[in-house]
Image (cartoon, grey):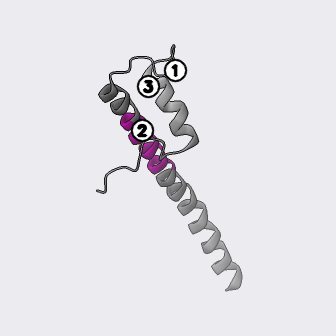
Amino acid sequence: MGKAVNGVFVLVTAIAMPVMCSQGIRETREARDSCVQRGVDYFRSMGVSAPDGARKPRDVAEDRCSRSLAAFGQPPPG
């Protein structure tokens, strides 16, 4: 009986872990994309076409958001 229970636990874990991990990756990707969009919007509202002199606003926003998802403020709740 104990081996059967352990086998079921291993099977459930093997199925559940990839599903849970992919959900976390998706949420992280969405949070990063949201941060980048806030950055692009920020630069656009400031009328800046090259924030650091040479790179595109999207590239600068991606760089900053890779370091902190709050680089351009917190996303609106929702």
Residue 58: numbered disc: 3
Which contiguous range is marked in magenta? 25-38
Dominant secondary-structure state across the stretch colored magenta = helix
The answer to whether marks 2 and 3 mark residues whose Cβ atoms lie closer than 8 Å is no
Q: In the image, is residue 69 part of the stretch drawn in magenta?
A: no
Q: Which residue is drawn at 37% across and 28% down?
A: 43
Q: Is mark 2 on a helix, strand or loop?
A: helix
Horizontally, residue 69 falls left or right of residue 5, namely left
The residue singled out by tag 1 in the image is: 52
Give the mark nearer the N terminus: 2 vs 3: 2
The three-letter amino acid code for the residue at tag 3 is Arg
The three-letter amino acid code for the residue at tag 2 is Asp
Question: On the rendered image, what quadrant is the N terminus found in?
Answer: bottom right
Give the mark nearer the N terminus: 1 vs 2: 2
Q: Residue at x 64, y 80 (%)?
A: 5
The three-letter amino acid code for the residue at tag 1 is Asp
Question: On the rendered image, what quadrant is the C terminus found in?
Answer: bottom left
Total numbered circles = 3
Q: What element carries label 1?
A: loop
Horizontally, residue 34 falls left or right of residue 24, namely left
Residue extending furthest toward the top? 54
Residue extending furthest toward the bottom? 1
Residue 33: numbered disc: 2
